[in-house]
Structure formats: C-alpha cells, structure tokens
Image (cartoon, helix red, strand yellow):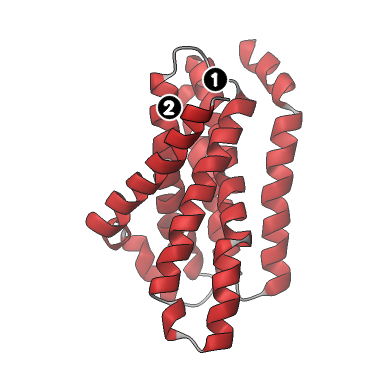
Amino acid sequence: VKLKTTLNVFFLTQLCVFVAWDLLGLPKVNPFYAFTGVHFPFNLLGYVFGVGLTEELGKMIPLLIILRKAKEPLIPQTMVFYGLMAGISFGVFEGVQYQMTVNAEQTYDVSFFLNIARLTSLPFLHACWCGIAGYFLSFAHLYPKYRRGLYVLAISIPAIVHGLYDSFADLGAISLVMVFLGLMLLMMYLKQSVDYQSKLRQ
C-alpha cells in the first residue's frame, strides 16, 4: 500500500459522501429509505436496499477510482486495506454528522453514549463492510471475465450484512451476531484468497 493512495482514499471518501449526502441528498432519492420507519420484517427493505445499498455504494466510489487509475494490478489484500480506510472515513463523517443532528437532540447521557459509539465501534464496522467490497473489486479487475458477478458480490454482501445489522440494532444479541458475521466473512475471504484466485484462473 502507498501512503499517498491511502490519504487519497480517506479524503476522497469524505468528499464523495459530502457531495452525495449533503449536496445531492442521495438518501432522499432512494425510495427504500421510507421503509426504515416501519416494523420488522418490512424494515429490512429499507435497511438493505435503502441504507445498506446506498452507503456501501458511496464508499465504493473512491475504490473504483483508485482501481481505474492504478498503474499496476492491486491484489485483494491491498484493496481490503483501502476499503478499510474508506469505511473508517465514512464512519467518521457519519459520526460527526450525527453529533450535530440526531445526538444533539438527546439527553446528555444518551448523547454521550451515542457519540462514543458513532466515533469508535461504528466506523470500525463500516471499515469491515467496505473491506469486503474492496476484496471483490480487486478480483473483478484481476479477472475481467467474471467482472459483473464480482461487482454484484462487492456491493450485495456488504449491503446485506449492513442492512441486517441496522434492522436488528435494537436487539443487542442479534446485532452482535451480525457484527461477528461481517468480521468472519472478511477474515475467511482473506484466508481463502489464494484458493479463490486459482479457481478464477481455471
């Protein structure tokens, strides 16, 4: 990995999210966001196809730019790292945004807890999900024959895990299972990357 590229990914993510969220109002355009306010299981539509899909797509844009401009192929481990940086960047942006809006309306103790969560554990989760996206994006550029399918995996797996986590956020035990699932998927993909590459070459 390169320091310059890492910094570019971090700040490019901030820029993309600012433009898409604050200037263009992308969440308001996606009709599935309306389902986030309904009860389970219909809220799954809102959190997977609304929140999950939109946010994971926003985090992917800098990774796609980095891949397109790269002078040499970027291996999965490298793209996972850049994905982690993009995810942390998005998580920090979201955390600051929540501090100035939703958290500011809460009581002091609730606001304090939410601020800590938004600026510590949640950026880590965003990083994990975006790391998975970076993993499959790397394979998509290394093996163009399977590019479409790998693009689908790059956006759908993080969006589904993200959406399920948000859907069950009020149920502590189940949301922790989704945290564990995301971490295990990322670790499994990294461990099996050599096997996956050999299968894609066949």
| Residue positioned 30% across, 51% down in the render | 20
Q: Is residue 74 above or below residue 129?
A: above
> Could you say where residue 66 lies in the image, as x and y percent from the top left?
43, 27
> Could you say where residue 196 lies in the image, as x and y percent from the top left?
68, 22
Packing grade of label 2 (10 A; few <14, some 14-19, many >=20) is some
Extreme left residue here? Answer: 24
Instruction: Give the quadrant of residue 37.
Output: bottom left
Q: Secondary structure at mark 1?
A: loop
Q: Is residue 101 left or right of residue 123?
A: left
> Could you say where residue 52 lies in the image, as x and y percent from the top left?
47, 55
Determine which residue is flagged by label 2.
66
| The N terminus lies in quadrant | top right
Determine which residue is flagged by label 1.
74
Q: Secondary structure at mark 2?
A: helix
| Residue positioned 39% across, 20% down in the render | 69
| Residue positioned 62% across, 46% down in the render | 128
> Could you say where residue 190 lies in the image, as x and y percent from the top left?
71, 31
Instruction: Give the quadrant of residue 197.
Output: top right
| Residue positioned 44% across, 69% down in the render | 98
Decide: marks 1, 2 in contact (CB < 8 A)?
Answer: yes
| The C terminus lies in quadrant | top right
